[in-house]
Image (cartoon, grey):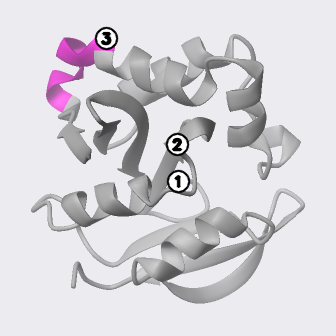
Amino acid sequence: MTSIEFLPREDRHDYYEVIDLIADAVLGDPEKINFMEEFLPITNRIRDPKDLRFSNYLHSNYKLLWAIRYNDEIVGFIGIDDYRHFNNAIGFGINVNFAKKGIVSAAWQLAKSFEKISYPLYAGTSQRNTPANKFLEKNGFILESEFDFEGEPSYKYVIHSNK
């Protein structure tokens, strides 16, 4: 069963252990790292030590952040933040062993009505990232445009409401 845990930005210092578990779940070993970074431009990949740097990023960046749990195990995250290429954008990641099972979609169904999410909400992903593109389209995001992200042909998606 999929569940989510909201990690309020103002209280993230109380969630260090949970955030470290997210970082370990998605970047804790070479197989996980390869899965998470497969579709990222080299210039956008996390420097070593990846899990520690990603944990620090999660602690200090996303304006909205949820831990994704599957059968009580932390397996990923959903976050919303402002990025240099567009504002109010969703980001997500999942442990390779739990990918392509509908877990992120189930988590998004729980998170999308959260009152602090403002719409429209954007997403950018590599055109090669078929799983992310399928997730976005399945969950109501509409392909808005194509763009180049640091040499990587990418798609920009938008969703206008939580309906």
Relative to 88, 118 lies left or right: left
Residue under label 1, please give it: 83
The kind of residue tagged 3 is: Glu
Q: Position of residue 66 (x, y in %)?
A: 29, 41
**Tally of marks:** 3
Q: Which residue is nearer to you in this view: 159 or 163?
A: 163
The mark lying in front, picked from 2 and 1, is 2
Q: Position of residue 69 (x, y in %)?
A: 31, 37
Q: Residues within 10 Å of mark 3 (few under 14, many from 20)?
A: few
Instruction: Tell me the CA gap for discs 1 and 3.
Output: 25 Å
Residue at the image position 62 percent from the left and 72 percent from the top = 133
Residue under label 3, please give it: 17
Residue under label 2, please give it: 98
Q: Is residue 109 above or below residue 56?
A: below
Displayed quadrant of residue 114: bottom left
Secondary structure of the residue carrying tag 1 is loop
Residue 15 part of the magenta segment: yes
Relative to 120, 58 lies left or right: right
Secondary structure of the residue carrying tag 2 is helix
The kind of residue tagged 2 is: Phe
Residue at the image position 68 percent from the left and 30 percent from the top = 32
- Answer with mark 1 or mark 3, whichever residue precedes in sequence: 3
Q: Is residue 52 above or below residue 66?
A: above
Please report the bounds of the magenta region as a residue range.
10-17
The kind of residue tagged 1 is: Tyr
Q: Position of residue 129 (x, y in %)?
A: 73, 63
The image quadrant where one finds the C terminus is bottom left
Q: Which residue is nearer to you in this view: 17 or 105?
A: 105
